[in-house]
Image (cartoon, rainbow, N blue to C red):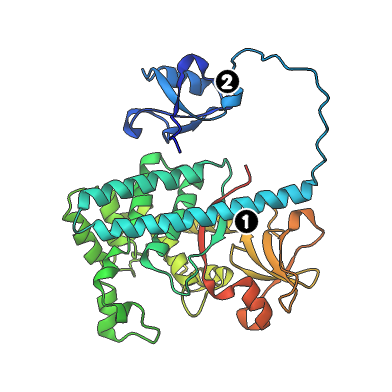
Amino acid sequence: MAKVEPIQLPLSKLQIGITVKLPLSWKNHPFLFNRIKIEEEAQIELIKSLGVPYVILLSGEDLIDEGEPEVDEVEVEQAPEVDPVEQAKMQVRKSLRLSQKRFIECVNESRSTFSKIASDPEGAYREAATLVENILEHMHEFKDPHLALVSAGESDSSVTQHGISVAVVALMIAKSMDLPKSDMRDIALGCLFHDIGKLKVPENIRRKKTALTASEANFIKMHPNFGHDMLHKTGLFNKTVLHIILHHHEFIDGTGYPDGLTEKKIPIVTQLVSLANDYDEQLWSNESRSPQIALGYLFKNHAGKHSETLISVLVKLLGIYPPGTIVKLSDGSVGKVMMTTQSVKQPQVWACQEDGSQPSLRFLTQEEVVVDSVLKRDELKDGALKVLQVDNGVSFYFSGME
């Protein structure tokens, strides 16, 4: 099959509604990404000022004015009306599938990057930088991105899977705080590599299910130092990224490690990653698993360890029923929250009857059904446990309906 050549669009053809890619490095233009959806005239004027002869047209070819084509007057059969509820469900399914696909791709790309960090650090850095750009573009595809439940299908979180999920949560917090794009890139890159030092910890210690001995716990606590030293030797990572990697377990009250830093000595980007990392770790602990219980754990056991401002932003992002929460609905069925919505009591859920029968994606904002209560794993019957895939673990990726 012949490769489709990209369309080089002259600047005179720029118009609102199309999506283009700039033929420039991200360092050489003021936009957040090379990929730009044109929504206002100011963007067109700014692109024209960059000195490029053309842009790459990504979508919206049908909007380009090529003159009015002649259309034969034929009777067109009217398309059947589409049920808006079914259409909304289709959009949700499509969005969730895309989030899952992108998450798996990111995990695989991160794993590839990790494998090269020792033998080909420059190649690893280039791959990581590209991955960061892709992640940021995914977030900014939506004016109002939401968190969607995704999974790598594993009962334990790998270092790479954990890194992607932490990056997603941290970036959502950063976006809510209107942090600049340079900070977002540093946050994303720091999150990808924040636990790379754990690969120097023996696997039998890393994956141990029973209580660690004092020496084993101390070994684990060395992983920020291991990771920092590994990446510092390459000479490729800036100070902010290296700070995130070394200090992502620091708390503002000085009880963290490795250096016991207090709030004034921890930059906001590192504080932000520390919170996202702390939350994601609770999702995989034996005591938590439930996203709602994990959030409650932070309030109860880690009060004062994170900025109240940052925690309030995280709570707003996750909502009352974060993705992955197992719930009982007001019609007696049970479900697992798949994606946050503006209506906090009517999220999008994968639901079934208590025995696991009649599984379906439920779009609660289109029904007179709300979340009645939160359920624990041991409150579910075997059929529902299997259908809802309760033991798959909880990770997050960006999603939306726009």
Q: Nearer the viewer, mark 1 or mark 2?
A: 2
Q: Position of residue 373 (x, y in %)?
A: 71, 71
Position above or below: 362 against 40: below
Q: Bin the neighbour count of mark 1 within 10 Å (Cα to Cα): few under 14, some 14-19, many 20 and up.
A: many
Disc 2 residue type? Ile
Q: Camera-side residue: 384 or 267?
A: 384
Classify the position of the C terminus by image quarter: top right
Q: Position of residue 206 (x, y in %)?
A: 33, 77
Asked which secondary structure carries label 2, the reply is loop
Disc 1 residue type? Thr
Q: Residue at x 27, y 69 (%)?
A: 199
Residue under circle 2?
64
Q: Are marks 1 and 2 in contact (CB under 8 Å)?
A: no
Position above or below: 308 against 186: below
Asked which secondary structure carries label 1, the reply is loop
Q: Camera-side residue: 183 or 98?
A: 98
Q: Residue at x 25, y 83 (%)?
A: 215
Q: Is residue 189 left or right of residue 309?
A: left
Q: Is residue 166 left or right of residue 342?
A: left
Residue under circle 1?
340
Total marks shown come to 2
Mark 1 / mark 2, whichever is N-terminal: 2
